[in-house]
Amino acid sequence: MKISNDIEYIGVDDHEIDLFEGQYIVENGMSYNSYLIKDEKIAVLDTVDAHFTEKWLDNVKHALHSRHPDYLIIQHMEPDHSASISHFMERYKDTKIVATAKAFVMMKQFFGTDFGDKKIVVGEGDTLSLGKHTLTFVMAPMVHWPEVMVTYDSCDKVLFSADGFGKFGALDIEDDWACEARRYYIGIVGKYGAQVQTLLKKASQLDIEIICPLHGPVLKEDLSYYLNLYQIWSSYSVETEGVMIAYTSIYGNTKKAVELLADKLREKGCTKVVVSDLARYDMAEAVEDAFRYSKLVLATTTYNNGIFPFMREFIHHLTERNFQNRIVGFIENGTWAPVAAKTMKQMLDTCKNLTFTDTTVQIKSALSEESRAQLEAFANELSSDDTI
């Protein structure tokens, strides 16, 4: 795939994978992106997952047209992008590897060598001339590993963005970019919003017309759309006004309360109400929705003097990704000693800028007149903001 006159896509699609990083469901597979810049000198940017080394090396050979690569640029050492480095160097022994100092430390850990006199260590603002193409290296530590850098080509105005602007899904599948990019970002990069903000500030100083990520499609049109979403996500701002209700239910009584609340919210004009059964719904999708919407309702049972395991896992996912800047309310159920609301609120203690609703709904085993009245008050409070 030609990206410009001199830049080609040489990556691969993976339809064999079921769980990316051993946890994220990827029904539409995954792409491992690699690029080649052909000038007076030739640079290959990043490699691919070990399962696709030979296919990728064939792509490299085909794109080279009997020429020899001068540089292998490694932006990120996670194995889905770096696993084929040693095989590449066995085939192209005279190629120089360009990477950060920390990346070379990781190469030694992964491969038993840092490639000695073949390495070129680069830092912030260093450049590499290929001829008419001059590459500038921009450091991006903890987006989302400490060795990460991105690469800017001033000739074609291309930002090679490492894992930034990536998404789940193979390139031969058409799906909604924002949905799978959001789930990818929140799940994998979400903890590092401050570091992404720093990188976005650096990127704002560059004249970018094309973004080439390590996962997902090359972005060429309306780049402001993608940049704006990254600004929202990395600043933990609200993307969509609405209510996300995450619940667990053992015998169906908490579920009935949640369904009643959702109905009441829609009747009161809330057009965006999302309900997730945490025991059955993709956990990564649920976490994504919690970060997307402005208000979050957590509904669960008291369980072993705490909360139901799926809810505990869900809240853990939120807190480790720096969940913040939201309105949060609770529904708790307990037959003899309900403590779920107290437990959930304590688990959220480390989160910044959370506003808790005045109303907490308490169910004693099953819905009663009293708990139904609390649900009505809860729905009124949640729907009082006319921006929903």
Image: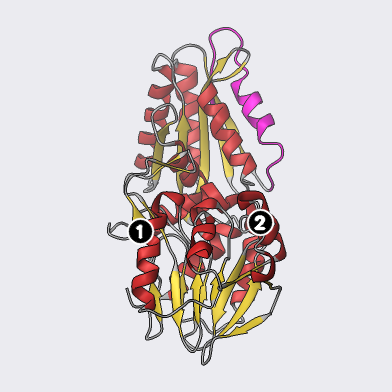
- Who's the residue at 57% across and 38% down the image? 317
Q: Quadrant of the N terminus?
A: bottom left
324 drawn magenta: no
Numbered disc in front, either 1 or 2: 2
Residue under numbered circle 1: 55
Task: For residue 220, say whether it is visible.
Answer: no
Q: Which residues are magenta?
A: 331-352
Task: Give residue 84's position: percent from left, percent from top.
Answer: 49, 57
Determine whether 321 is above or below 349 in the image: below
Kindly report the distance in space between the C-alpha atoms of the residues bearing marks 1 and 2.
24 Å
Mark 2: amino acid: Thr
Quarter of the image for residue 198 reads bottom right
Mark 1 crowdedness (10 Å alpha carbons): few <14, some 14-19, many ≥20: some
- Who's the residue at 44% across and 75% down the image? 36
- Residue 208 lies left or right of residue 55; in this view the side is right
- Who's the residue at 51% across and 26% down the image? 310
Determine whether 151 is above or below 115 in the image: below
Spot the residue most to the bottom: 132
Task: State the SS at label 1.
Answer: helix
Mark 1: amino acid: Lys
Determine whether 174 is above or below 334 in the image: below
- Who's the residue at 36% across and 53% down the image? 169
Seen from the viewer's position, the closer of residues 308 and 274 is 308
Residue under numbered circle 2: 113
